[in-house]
Amino acid sequence: MNVGQVCGRHVVTVLPGSELVAAAGLMREKHIGYLVVVESEWMRRPVGVLTDRDIVVSVVAKNVDPASLTVGDVMTSRVVATDEQGPLDAALVQMRRNGVRRLPVLGPEGEVVGVLSIDDALQAIMHELDNAAGSIRLEREVERATRD
């Protein structure tokens, strides 16, 4: 199973020069805690990510005026991303090694095409486990029916 089969395709992006308060408002409006920061509106290559935690740790906890900051001032600029054609298990290893719960998913040109969350991965894994368990249950039912 590859990342592209599992990831969410609705990506909310923001530019580095955007006002931080506007980005926080976008998070609230969309009910999300993660934005992918892209180069420009037409070049959707990620240059960072902004999380609700970034805002709390870098702004609120330090009592900094959020109106004076841009997304670029607060974002995590070290982007850990994965390829949409890459295997899911490799993406999970990447998440664990980097201590993140989400990864931007990149297309063939390095553009962001999705976001893989740990929830997406767990849901896919649970689906696979359910299929395996269903196969075992069916096998038992067939064995019982042939014995009776």
Image (tube, rainbow, N blue to C red):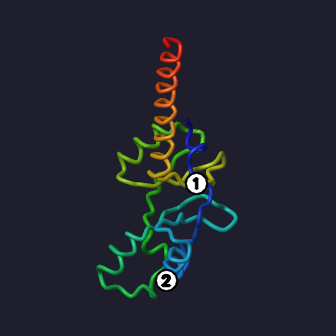
Residue at the spot of label 2: 21
Where does the image place residue 34, in percent across and percent down from the top left?
Answer: 48, 65
User: Is 43 above or below relative to 129?
Assistant: below
Q: Which mark is residue 110?
A: none
In front of the other: 20 or 143 = 143
Where does the image place residue 7, in percent across and percent down from the top left?
Answer: 56, 49
> What residue lies at 48% left-to-right and 63% top-to-bottom?
49
Amino acid identity at mark 1: Gly
64 horizontally vs 107: left or right: left
In front of the other: 8 or 108 = 8
7 horizontally vs 126: left or right: right
Amino acid identity at mark 2: Val
Check disc 2 and report its element: helix, strand or loop.
helix
Extreme residue toward the right, this view:
42
Check disc 1 and report its element: helix, strand or loop.
loop
User: Is 77 above or below relative to 122?
Assistant: below
Where does the image place residue 22, in percent across and percent down from the top left?
Answer: 53, 81
Extreme residue toward the left, this view:
62
> What residue lies at 64% left-to-right and 48% top-to-bottom?
107
User: From the image, which quarter does the N terminus lie in?
Assistant: top right
26 horizontally vs 133: left or right: right
Of marks 1 and 2, the one in the foreground? 1
Where does the image place residue 32, in percent across and percent down from the top left?
Answer: 50, 68
Residue at the spot of label 1: 8
Marker count (numbered): 2
Q: Measure the C-alpha gap from mark 1 to mark 2.
A: 25 Å
Extreme residue toward the top, this view:
147
Badge 1 vs badge 2, beta-carbon distance below 8 Å? no
> What residue lies at 58% left-to-right and 54% top-to-bottom?
8
Q: Earlier in the sequence, mark 1 or mark 2?
A: 1
52 horizontally vs 19: left or right: left
